[in-house]
Image (cartoon, helix red, strand yellow):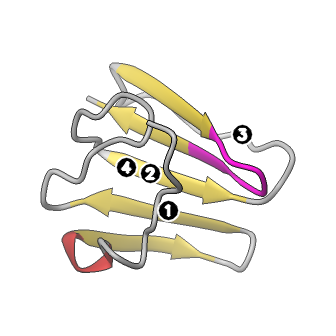
């Protein structure tokens, strides 16, 4: 989609599940669009870490968007 995903602009439409300074995880409560495909996502993980491992047991599809300073991973399912 090209534009930077602004989690602060849509924060009221998501539920914060985790934030530890390096990784932030939100659940989508109100059909926020995935920055990669445009469809509503289930969860979004934002990290400035170079790599990250996580469980995908509840995801039917995974979308990844790379911005200059962070990685965004959305699950759909």
- Check disc 2 and report the residue beneath it: 44
**Disc 3 and disc 1: Cα gap in Å?**
13 Å
Please identify, in this view, whether the residue under mark 3 or under mark 4 is nearer the observer.
4
Q: Position of residue 19 (x, y in %)?
A: 58, 76
Closest to the observer, 33 or 20 = 33
Q: Answer few, some or many: residues within 10 Å of disc 3's Cα (few below 14, many 20 plus, some between 14 and 19).
A: few
Report the magenta residues as a range: 66-72
**Disc 1 or 2, which lies upstream in sequence?**
1
**Disc 1 or 4, which lies upstream in sequence?**
1
Please identify, in this view, whether the residue under mark 3 or under mark 1 is nearer the observer.
1
Q: Is residue 31 above or below residue 25?
A: above
**Disc 2 or 3, which lies upstream in sequence?**
2
At 58% across and 37% down in the image, what residue appears?
A: 65
Q: Position of residue 13 (x, y in %)?
A: 20, 70
At 23% across and 53% down in the image, what residue appears?
A: 32
- Left or right placement of residue 53 versus residue 37 in this view: right
Q: Position of residue 43 (x, y in %)?
A: 37, 49
Please identify, in this view, whether the residue under mark 2 or under mark 3 is nearer the observer.
2
- Check disc 4 and report the residue beneath it: 43
Q: Answer few, some or many: residues within 10 Å of disc 2's Cα (few below 14, many 20 plus, some between 14 and 19).
A: many
**Disc 3 or 1, which lies upstream in sequence?**
1
Residue 53, numbered circle: 3
- Quadrant placement of the N terminus: top left
Q: Is residue 11 above or below residue 34?
A: below
- Left or right placement of residue 46 versus residue 48 in this view: left
Q: Secondary structure at mark 4?
A: strand
**Disc 4 and disc 2: Cα gap in Å?**
4 Å
Say whether marks 1 and 2 touch (CB < 8 Å): yes
């Amino acid at each position: 989609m090209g534009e930077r995903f602004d989690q602060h602009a849509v924060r009221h439409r998501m539920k914060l599940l985790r934030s530890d300074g390096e990784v932030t995880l939100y659940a989508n409560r109100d059909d926020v669009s995935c920055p990669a495909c445009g469809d509503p996502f289930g969860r979004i993980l934002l990290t400035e870490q170079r790599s990250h491992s996580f469980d995908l047991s509840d995801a039917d599809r995974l979308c990844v968007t790379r911005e200059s300073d962070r990685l965004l991973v959305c699950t759909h399912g």
